[in-house]
Image: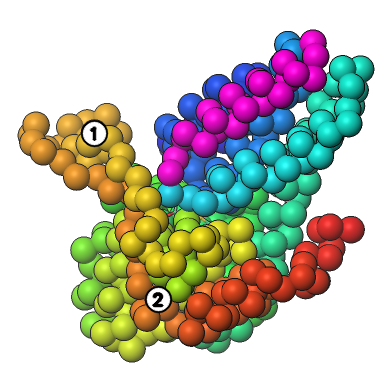
Amino acid sequence: MLDQRRLPGEIVYHTYADYREVARAIKEMEIRGAPAIGVAAAMGIALGVERSAARSLGELKTEFSEICEAMAKTRPTAVDLFWAIGRMRERFEALAAGAKDGDLARLRSAMVEEAQRIHAEKRAIDEAIGRHGAALLPREGRVMTQCNAGALATAGYGTALGVIRMAVSEGRRIEVLVPETRPYLQGARLTAWELQQDGIPLTLITDNMVGHIFKRGGVGAVVVGADRIAANGDTANKIGTYQIAVLAREHGVPFYVAAPVSTLDLSLPSGEHIPIEERPGEEVTHIQGVRIAPEVAVANPAFDVTPARLIAAIITERGVARPPYASSLRQLADAAASTAADSRVRA
Ligand code: MRU
């Protein structure tokens, strides 16, 4: 696992042999970004099953529940985490039904294969999101994002940055405006690094420059990722996304969300019901271990919710949803997995 806390200064990979270490890595944001958290959780579950000392199916079932519970407790907002746990659970239950104690080795390797399949599918899904979204971006000009919704945050291509990447590969001449994204600095540390590696032009700004930049003009679109999208289209994403959406509306700039269908949580009627993670105060009072504020009360909500009315479109691997989202998102969720990406990854 590439340690995202150390980027861009150091490139450090960790190898984990215990699912509890994977859970801790997710919680401490060694790996972060909704789809990447989901893939890591699936891998963590596979690791837990593979390394389990269980000698009977009954023992393995008990341990499996404990493993899933440990993963579910890591981060509350990104629904991809719960999607991935659900998918691994479904597979486990299907394999366990009718299995005998002698089938444990087969079951273990099938769970590893399922996690690897999730990884491969997620990558193909991002590319499909990119293809659907690229046409919405200007042929030439500046596009703002927030946080890091790129390769690091996903299975290797990106959702919001995947849209940008695809648009650039299709010949659009785009410069990306990258807000630094306090307090964790995913924009400054990760998005700036990723874009630089890819040779995509970017300008890094601090979060409080966003209004000024919009007012000066020349921003053609905003595209961000998502951690959870409610049935009415309200979207939770990294803290600071909401204020960008409000400013985009004020300045007539289209605001797009790019996310896989697994990020839809149609069980929630609106964004008010999305759990918002509150992270440790040290992330605000300290930068890279150096205290920058006195010992005072601190708020650190990691996400905010952008109301659906500020979102011009939600780009998924199955197509682009437009308002009213209650019906367009339902249609996408119900669509048989028949898009090119879906059929390719399932083949
Ligand atoms: O706290 P993080 O870094 O996990 O938050 C990440 C974001 O908010 C991303 O924009 C979102 O997960 C989409 S990633 C493709």
Q: Quadrant of residue 171?
A: bottom right
In the displayed structure, 57 sits above or below 81; it is above
Give the image location of residue 314, x and y in percent. 52, 75
Label placed on residue 282: 1
Query: Which amino acid does the dot numbered 2 rest on?
Result: Ala
Give the image location of residue 146, x and y in percent. 39, 62
Q: Is residue 206 visible?
A: yes
Query: Which amino acid does the dot numbered 1 rest on?
Result: Glu
Residue 301 magenta: no
Q: Quadrant of residue 207?
A: bottom left
Q: Disc 2 marks which residue? A: 308
Q: Are marks 2 and 1 in contact (CB under 8 Å)?
A: no
In the displayed structure, 259 sits above or below 325; it is above
Residue 72 magenta: yes
User: In the shown orientation, is residue 252 left or right of residue 136?
Assistant: left
User: In the shown orientation, is residue 132 left or right of residue 188?
Assistant: right
User: In the shown orientation, is residue 306 left or right of residue 331?
Assistant: left
Disc 2 is placed on an element classified as: helix
Give the image location of residue 233, x and y in percent. 46, 72
Label placed on residue 129: none
Q: Main secondary structure of the magenta part?
A: helix
- Boundaries of the magenta span: 55-76
Q: Closer to the N terminus: mark 2 or mark 1? A: 1
Q: Is residue 201 visible?
A: no
Tell me the quadrant of the picture where the N terminus can be found: top right
